[in-house]
Amino acid sequence: MKRAWLLSALVAQALACSATPTSGLRSPISDSDAVRAIIGEGANQSDAALAGIASAIHNRGNLRGVFGLRNPVVDTASDALWARARRAWNLAKTGGDPEDIRGCKFFGCPTDMQWFHKHGFIAVKTIGQITFYKP
């Protein structure tokens, strides 16, 4: 009985993790979490890289595996950086994906490249230090 319960719990968790947003108009990610993640991932990057990060997060539909959400640099970010990240997130929510990385759901720095290639991801474009990938 324990095994059956555990199996059903694992299946339910897997289904919850693989859920995708049902509407392209609204992301299930809160605006504040998204902006924190964008800052945490791209605090030292250009507006184009921030827009790409925002777009990838929006396309993915969740923040699973996004280290930036918990990056301590967010707590000391300037008001100007917060404004840039908010602008990038709002652009992503309204369908303003940077055309050259349209459809990307993942991104990483140069040290992540080997992992992405090993798992069959396709590098689409690099902006600054951030490379954007499609599965």
Image (cartoon, rainbow, N blue to C red):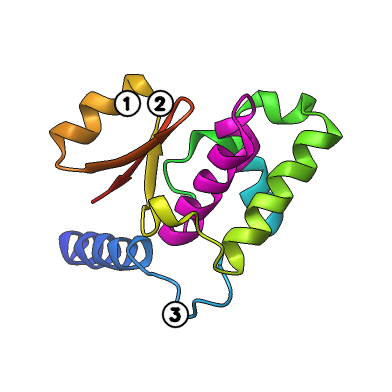
Residue at horizontal 41 percent and vertical 57 percent from the top: 60
Q: Give the range drawn in magenta.
A: 38-62
Instruction: Check residue 112 in the rendering and tell me which mark sits there, or answer none.
Output: 1
Residue at the outermost top position: 111
| Number of the front mark, 3 or 1 | 1
Residue carrying label 2: 109
Residue at horizontal 28 percent and vertical 61 percent from the top: 14
- Under circle 3, the secondary element is loop
Residue type at tag 2: Cys
| Residue 135 vertical position relative to residue 23 in the rendered view, above or below | above
Measure the alpha-carbon separation of dots 1 and 2: 5 Å
Residue at horizontal 85 percent and vertical 35 percent from the top: 79
- Under circle 1, the secondary element is helix
Q: Position of residue 3 (x, y in %)?
A: 16, 59
| Residue 86 vertical position relative to residue 12 in the rendered view, above or below | above
| Number of the front mark, 2 or 3 | 2
Residue carrying label 3: 22
Residue type at tag 1: Asp
Residue type at tag 3: Thr
Identify the mark nearer the N-term, 2 or 3.
3
Nearer to me, 26 or 14: 26
Whether tag 1 and tag 2 are in contact, CB under 8 A, the answer is yes
Q: Residues within 10 Å of mark 3 (few under 14, many from 20)?
A: few
Q: Main secondary structure of the magenta part?
A: helix
| Residue 77 vertical position relative to residue 105 in the rendered view, above or below | above
- Under circle 2, the secondary element is loop
Nearer to me, 119 or 48: 48
Corner quadrant of residue 112 = top left
